[in-house]
Amino acid sequence: MRFRYVCTECETTYEISPRILVCPACSKKQQADKPLRGILEVASEEAPQASEEAAQTDAASDIYDYLPVDRRFFPPIPVGNTPLWEPFNLRKKTGFANLYIKDDTFNPTGSLKDRASYLVAAFAQQHGIRRIVVASTGNAASSMAGVGAAAGLEVTIFIPQSAPPAKLVQALQYGAEVILVKGNYDKAYDLSLEYSASRRDSNEGYVLSRNTGYNPLTIEGKKTVSFEICAQLRDPVDFLFVPTGDGVILSGVYKGFRDLKSLGTIDRVPTIFAVQAEGSRALYTAFQSGDFTETPVPSATIADSIAVDVPRAGYYALRQLQSHDGRCVTVSDADITEAQRLLSSTTGLFAEPAAAAALAGFLAVKDQLPADARVVLLITGSGLKDIESARKGVKMPCS
Ligand SMILES: *Cc1c(COP(=O)(O)O)cnc(C)c1O
């Protein structure tokens, strides 16, 4: 299958190339303190058709047919194909007999971010690119560092000083060049873009930005989780809970379900709940009012992976929520800490705060949902990545 980029705003199409990340025309309209303009989406040039083979086996095994990089370029590290499982005790506790967990802590670096890093690394291999740069609150950095190591790529990361130490140590273990930023994620983001722009035409070679939302492949890579859920569950998903900061996972999840719908694999896109922290709820606010009109509020939440002032994929994510009858819900840090411990103690799955927010969001709205609904919680990252936050939910024994 052949693919192109399509601008999600003006619908201009572009040939897929490392030299183009956002739509040149629409990105000129970028305003400070607003989500990214001119995000590109991958689209196939032919009308999508499920291959006969794919229809007979499951969609996930043929996912490479629906990705814009040939399978031979992917590094030899087992990303994706994570388990979808049935948490019996949590089912009993919540009264939802068809509750499922999609456990993306199983990815090699412990978070869903590997799905994006995997596609970006393969793309770099295909185009002979040697270095990748990324700004991150932690997981995208450790993910790109790990998957990049498997591919033999050089990785530079810009990470705020406040990032959980485990994520930083992880990135260093994988051999990444780490630049600690005095300031927040947004500052790190700007610095990383300056870094890649300054090397655009240098002799050192082209540096590819993996910044989330900015590189279209970060959205495309994350769609694989929807393909897997459909193949694993077979019956249609009714409700899916997705922890949301920049809105790139949310957008990728939607992209996956839209692809599956146009392939004829599913009849409808599930109802998706974007779960945000009360202290980082820009998308929620925009969803309520219909647009990003408010001045950004500095984020403050225990869930560092969903702490953003300005959601990068904000416009795009908002449009998907609006056009697929999605929902948005916020949860407090106390709710998140409680959900984290509930998840650990009833299922054996220790998730980081951002990931536990999916359960907190479900608990917040479950009384409005039919108890026989098929509900999937997307658990996006491992609890071992942030022990300091998890400590707040438990009582340490005295010595
Ligand atoms: C990045 C991340 C999220 C949020 O994804 P966005 O694309 O920023 O909305 C949620 N959970 C974990 C563990 C993450 O690493």
Image (cartoon, helix red, strand yellow):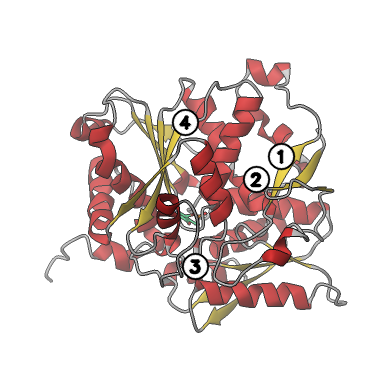
Q: Is mark 3 within 8 Å of ligand 1?
A: yes
Reading the image, the residue beneath label 2 is 220
Instruction: Single out the mark in the foreground, 3 or 4.
Output: 4
- The answer to whether residue 22 is above or below residue 272 is below
N-terminal of the pair, mark 4 or mark 1, is 1
Measured in 3D between alpha carbons, the distance from the residue under mark 2 to the one under mark 3, in whole angstroms, is 20 Å
Measured in 3D between alpha carbons, the distance from the residue under mark 3 to the one under mark 4, in whole angstroms, is 29 Å
N-terminal of the pair, mark 4 or mark 2, is 2
**For the residues bearing labels 4 and 2, Cβ distance under 8 angstroms:** no
Q: Work out whether residue 79 can be spotted.
A: no
Reading the image, the residue beneath label 3 is 137
Q: Is residue 205 left or right of residue 368?
A: right
Please name the amino acid that badge 4 sits on. Pro
**For the residues bearing labels 1 and 2, Cβ distance under 8 angstroms:** yes
Please name the amino acid that badge 1 sits on. Leu
Farthest bottom residue in view: 182
Measured in 3D between alpha carbons, the distance from the residue under mark 1 to the one under mark 2, in whole angstroms, is 7 Å
Please name the amino acid that badge 2 sits on. Glu
Label 2 crowding class (10 Å Cα cut-off): few <14, some 14-19, many 20+?
many
N-terminal of the pair, mark 2 or mark 3, is 3
Reading the image, the residue beneath label 1 is 67
